Image: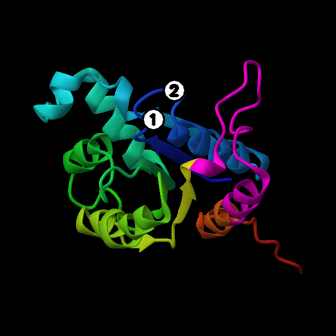
């Protein structure tokens, strides 16, 4: 199956976007895809902001993006814009790094008013940095995500209605990922 990279712009491991990222990763794994998560907050801040592509952690992050067949970009929406963490990483990508990859934007925010940031800010940003296959994204309102309970499964804090919609979106993303080449059989 394909390799999917979850790029998380979540400011902390317990923030709502982290729950969305965990849910997406679990859905991709259930579909048989290889998954990894890149938490941009874990990259060295000075190297990220200084655009130091020579920093080992930054270099590894960029390599992970380039080697993935598809990306799920998860961002909180603040004041009608995506996370600065996401923007900082995307600005470092070399030209063409997202060309041909399936890219799924997911966002969380405090109100339905933040929904416009998904279509009018995050998706255009992905196209601007060279993505050619940006799928329709999904917005999960903060009120649809409850605080993580100790010992809960990844993404379990997403309320059932939002979880079902998010699962549908991730399944559409799975369909956009490349399939392994089928061995052709020649009959005599």
List x then y, in percent, for residue 101.
45, 63
List x then y, in percent, for residue 33.
68, 48
Q: Which dot marks residue 99?
A: none
Q: Relative to 80, is 108 on the left or the right? A: right
Asked whether 115 or 33 is in front, the reply is 115
Q: Which dot marks residue 38?
A: 1
Q: Relative to 97, is 109 on the left or the right? A: right
Hey, which quadrant is residue 141 in on the image? bottom right
Disc 2 is placed on an element classified as: loop
Q: Is 120 one of the magenta-colored residues?
A: no
Residue holding disc 2: 13
Q: Quadrant of the image for the C terminus? A: bottom right
Q: Is 158 one of the magenta-colored residues?
A: yes
Above or below, comparing residue 99 to residue 92 in the picture = below
Q: Relative to 28, is 21 on the left or the right? A: left
Residue range corresponding to the magenta coloring = 143-168
Sequence-wise, which precedes: disc 2 or disc 1?
2
Which residue appears at 73% of the width and 54% of the height?
Answer: 163
List x then y, in percent, for residue 111.
48, 58
Closer to the eye: label 2 or 1: 2
The answer to whether residue 111 of the structure is visible from this angle is yes
């Amino acid at each position: 199956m394909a390799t999917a990279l979850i790029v998380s712009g979540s400011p902390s491991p317990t923030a709502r976007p982290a729950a969305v990222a965990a849910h997406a990763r679990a859905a991709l794994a259930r579909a048989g895809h290889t998954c990894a998560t890149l938490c941009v907050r874990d990259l060295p801040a000075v190297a990220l902001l200084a655009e130091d592509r020579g920093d080992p952690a930054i270099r590894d992050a960029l390599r992970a993006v380039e080697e993935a067949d598809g990306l799920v970009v998860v961002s909180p929406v603040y004041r009608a814009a995506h996370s600065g963490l996401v923007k900082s990483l995307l600005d470092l990508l070399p030209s063409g790094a997202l060309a041909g990859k399936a890219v799924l934007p997911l966002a969380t925010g405090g109100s339905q008013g933040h929904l416009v940031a998904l279509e009018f800010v995050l998706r255009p940003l992905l196209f601007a940095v060279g993505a050619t296959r940006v799928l329709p994204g999904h917005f999960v309102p903060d009120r649809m995500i409850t605080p993580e309970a100790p010992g809960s499964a990844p993404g379990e804090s997403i309320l059932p209605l939002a979880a079902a919609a998010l699962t549908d979106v991730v399944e559409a993303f799975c369909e956009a990922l490349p399939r392994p080449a089928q061995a052709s059989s020649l009959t005599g």
